[in-house]
Image (cartoon, grey):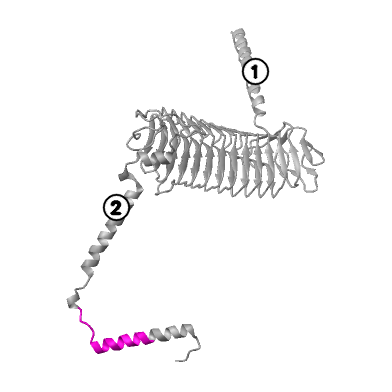
Amino acid sequence: MKNVLLVFNVKKFALRIILLFSLFSILIPLSKVNIVNAESTIYIRSDGSVEGTDKIQRDGNVYSFIGDINGSIIVEKDNIVVDGAGYTLQGIGSGVGLNLTARSNVTIKNIEIKAFHEGISLASSSECNISGNNITENTYYGIWLFMSSDNVIFGNNITNNYYGIKLWLSSNNAFCENNITHNGCGIWFASIKNSSVSRNNVKNSFRGIHLEASSANIISANNIIGNSYGIQLERSPNNNVSINNIIGNSYGIHLKDSPNNNVSINNITSNQYGIVLSGPYAYSSGENIVYGNNITNNDFGIQVISPSNSIYYNNFINNTKQAYTEEYSFFGANYWSDYTGKDRNGDNIGDTPYGDYLDLIPLMRPWTLGWRPKPSVDQALEEEIPFWMQWWFWTIIAVVIVTLAGTVYLKKRKPSISNISPPPTEDYSKHQSARQDCCFFQILLVLNPNFDR
């Protein structure tokens, strides 16, 4: 019996040892996870000195990393280059990775900037260059610009941030050849003027490129793929959206309360909505020009909910619903893949309108840059639109109606001559004489201002 108990106790002890070793093998690796020994805040001082780390090496105005750094860097000197040399600037989910406030001509390049609240912050800074960085997993902004101008953001990989790039109250900045993917919003402009977004890949975000209360900006030659909103303008007039590839988004291009924009020469394909012009108020997204776009294989090619837009020389090809309109806008000289009309005179313009008079001069072949149908669109409009739909016909009708109404009104108000008593002859003669004397003296005063009556 004692032997049995001894064997049982030995087994029980061995089991406890095994469990303890197993527990240590789990806890020891876990103790090393997510532990970042943050260095104190690092400064590049205005006199050129570096404080807070020995991992930045200075050579003239070039400051190079020689190892990974845990902590934030505040730049207080202009006209310098901060080169990460491929090393990492690591945060803990808060603070600012690289802080440039009131700086000029600073270059930030070749750094992996990770896990801050803001990866790079430019405030009241100008002529800075942010290039070749990997900016990832920051809790709010990958790059933040505030009241900053004439900066270039070039060739960065910006991923898994809440905002990839956000600007506010800034102007004349350029964003080009960046890969901006898997962010809450790729690029967000708020009150921005005269800036450009070109040749970027903006993918797999809730909003690809969003402009709010911004004007005179250019969005061109970007690949906008797999976002909920590809390009969205909200309360933003006078922008140019052109030569973009916009593929596989819920909304390809959405103009909301945004008038007087140019949307041209874009490839818009396989989106739920290709182009949407909308707003709660009349003319809120009016006076836009939608020109020369290839709009193909979308659920809705174009949806027009605001009036007074001009939509011409576009190719609508194999969209489930080519166009949906609630307000009148001009559609003219577009190509519609489902048009079944004829072209008997060979001028490449259909003899009958497309749809329910949606497009009065539909093209018989897809439009291409530099090609125009013959005769010209203006001539075709004159030939194809019936006289009773011409503007001059209804102008004449309006003038006739107003003239007749005025005549009838005046006849009803004109008093009968029989009811008017003539003035007494003597009083009338005196009145006429007085008027003549008055006119005579006025003429004399003009000819001779010193005349004394």
Q: Residues within 10 Å of mark 2 (few under 14, many from 20)?
A: few
Closer-to-camera residue (419/448): 448
Residue 176 percent coordinates (x, y): 62, 37
Residue 432 percent coordinates (x, y): 31, 85
Q: Which residue is mark 1?
A: 17
Give the left or right position of residue 262, taking residue 87 as reference: left
Residue occupying the point 20% across, 79% down: 420
Residue occupying the point 60% across, 11% down: 8
Residue 428 located within the stretch drawn in magenta: yes
Q: Which residue is mark 2?
A: 397
Residue 435 located within the stretch drawn in magenta: yes
Q: Which residues are magenta?
A: 420-437
User: Dot 1: what SS?
Assistant: helix
Q: How many marks?
A: 2
Give the left or right position of residue 418, taking residue 121 as reference: left
Residue, far left: 418
